[in-house]
């Protein structure tokens, strides 16, 4: 509790990984409660055959729906993991509208670490794009992978033309709801992009537009 309390009060909030050390203990506590919830109740000293039948029902039949719920959740977890491959960094479960919309909740290391740069290159190759203006968030080098097709871009430069790509972190930083007390500079707001919809995505973390 102290660790969680300190994490919640800390001004540094860049990902759930900061509370990962507490997860094993949470799993242990949850596992115990799940076992108690599922396990049937057996009366070791039934007074008559009716109580004996009721005890058998509570022990073996009553827990079946709970086992089915757990099995469904387990299968859901396995399928979600398999279907999210290889986009694990951008993964959000269905309760958060899935990986495609997880950027609306949190970006940066929770969603976008520049992992889709090579997928942007693949998209450009497959669609024979000669030039792409790019506002990229990550440690990779767009110039290295895209070569002369790369044109560095950002909001203050004004409207781009042709193909424009932007990382989810920068897109949300420009268009997402701001935190209390945070003032977004108008030149950083990508107002000229707000009336357009992306025509595609490289992975989940890079949005691709076709502008006039």
Image: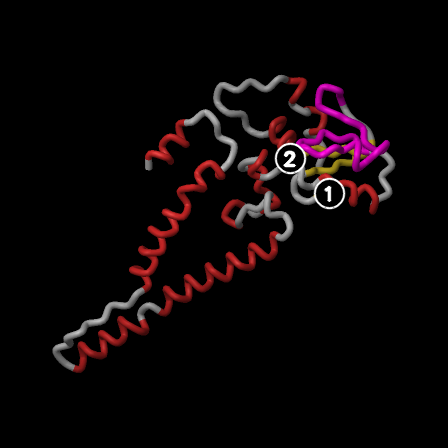
Query: Is 148 included in the stretch rendered in magenta?
Result: yes
Distance Cα–Cα, label 1 vs label 2? 13 Å
Q: Which of marks 1 and 2 is nearer the N terminus?
A: 2
Quarter where residue 104 is shown: top right
Q: Please name the residue shown 47% across and 60% down the image.
A: 74
Q: Please name the residue shown 14% across and 75% down the image.
A: 45
Q: In this view, does 129 lie to the left or right of 99?
A: right
| Residue where numbered disc 2 is placed | 168
| Residue where numbered disc 1 is placed | 200
The residue sitting at the left extreme is: 47
Q: In which quarter of the image is the C terminus?
A: top right
Q: Nearer the viewer, residue 185 or 191?
A: 185
Q: In this view, does 195 lie to the left or right of 99?
A: right
Q: Is residue 78 left or right of residue 165?
A: left
Vertical side of 203 occupied by 185: above or below? above
Q: Are marks 1 and 2 in contact (CB under 8 Å)?
A: no
Quarter where residue 168 is shown: top right
């Amino acid at each position: 509790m102290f660790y969680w309390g300190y994490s919640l009060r800390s001004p540094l909030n860049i990902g759930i990984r900061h509370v990962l050390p507490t997860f094993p203990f949470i799993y242990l506590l949850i596992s115990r409660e799940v076992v108690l919830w599922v396990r049937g109740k057996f009366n070791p000293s039934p007074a008559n055959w009716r109580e004996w039948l009721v005890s058998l029902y509570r022990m073996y039949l009553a827990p079946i729906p709970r086992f089915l719920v757990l099995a469904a959740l387990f299968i859901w977890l396995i399928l979600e993991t398999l279907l999210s491959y290889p986009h694990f960094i951008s993964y959000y479960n269905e309760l958060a509208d899935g990986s495609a919309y997880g950027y609306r909740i949190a970006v940066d290391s929770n969603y976008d670490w520049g992992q889709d740069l090579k997928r942007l290159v693949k998209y450009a190759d497959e669609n024979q794009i000669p030039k792409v203006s790019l506002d990229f968030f990550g440690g990779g080098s767009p110039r290295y992978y895209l070569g002369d097709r790369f044109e560095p871009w950002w909001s203050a430069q004004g409207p781009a033309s042709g193909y424009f790509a932007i990382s989810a972190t920068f897109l949300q930083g420009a268009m997402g709801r701001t935190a209390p007390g945070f003032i977004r500079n108008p030149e950083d707001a990508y107002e000229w992009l707000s009336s357009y919809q992306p025509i595609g995505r490289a992975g989940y973390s890079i949005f691709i537009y076709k502008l006039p």
